Image (cartoon, helix red, strand yellow):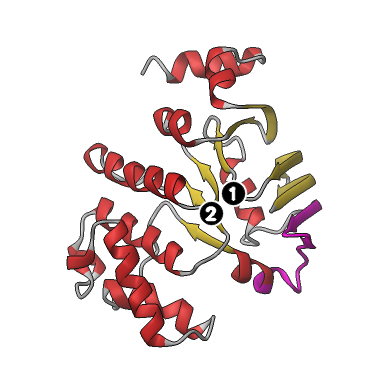
Amino acid sequence: MIKLENVNKNFGSVHVLKDVNLTVTEGEKLVIIGPSGSGKSTTIRCMNGLEEATSGKVIIEGTLLTHKNKLQICRKYCAMVFQHFNLYPHMTVLENLILAPIKVNKRKKDEVVKEAYKYLEVVGLTDKAKVYPQTLSGGQQQRVAIARALVSKKEIILFDEPTSALDPETVQEVLDIMCKISKETTTTMVVVTHEMGFAKEVADRIVFMEDGRIIEEAKPKDFFENPKSERTKSFLSKILTH
């Protein structure tokens, strides 16, 4: 579904991604972890064209992303859930969910509304369809953002630290929804997160990044019980004791 080949990304003189090679297979649940500033979010943003690789290749469903086609390809295959929800404040929850499928994908309104209610039920917010986002808690807004991604019916959903802007009480409600989706759908998921419990439960594979490089990747059991890199061991020893 997704392939990165020797991807480098520079922001001015800052070399953020350094020869990143990564393949995500169809239906896989991939979790990317690492310290702040390691390049995790930039990696995921290169996957959906929000950032353009300085060099190297990004391939989605067999198609090489270019400056000309990235919008078309990413709209076709990828949905994204951001840290800060990115909901339209002047639109109701329902209107937020149906806007893109109708305007961009030219789907019939009746069909999309039906789908929207279906996924609002999945995230436990059917009763909030007619309210505005600012009346919801942060956790509820992020659940709406997840429902919006599901309504788009894309084959890939990218999650960029979806719980980092939430207060501790609402983190779990969002993680629970993501766990549910991972178990009940064949959607390919790539998740950047600091939530180790979620990574253990959901991931088919975990990638550890530091300083713009992939240091280690493994299945959750091997990753947490027998990390090979000393840097991975050091990171886990700090993060798992907090």
Q: In screen coordinates, is 137 left or right of 50?
A: left
Q: Which residues are magenta?
A: 54-72
The residue that mark 1 highlights is 27
Give the percent coordinates (x, y) of residue 19. Answer: 79, 39
Q: Is residue 240 left or right of residue 212?
A: left
Q: Quadrant of residue 144?
A: bottom left
Q: Secondary structure at mark 1?
A: loop
Q: Amino acid at mark 1?
A: Gly
Q: Which mark is residue 187?
A: 2
Query: Looking at the rendering, which quadrant does residue 99 occupy?
Result: bottom left
Q: Residue at x 66, y 14 (%)?
A: 228
| Disc assigned to residue 203 | none
Examine the rendering and report whether any part of residue 239 can be seen: yes
Q: CA distance from mark 1 to mark 2?
A: 5 Å
Tag 2's secondary structure? Answer: loop
Image x and y of residue 172, in percent: 29, 39
Mark 1–mark 2 contact, CB under 8 Å? Answer: yes
The amino acid on which the numbered mark 2 sits, given as a three-letter code, is Thr
Instruction: Name the residue: 47% across, 77% down.
Output: 100
Tell me: 24 left or right of 107. Answer: right
Q: Nearer the viewer, residue 116 or 56?
A: 116
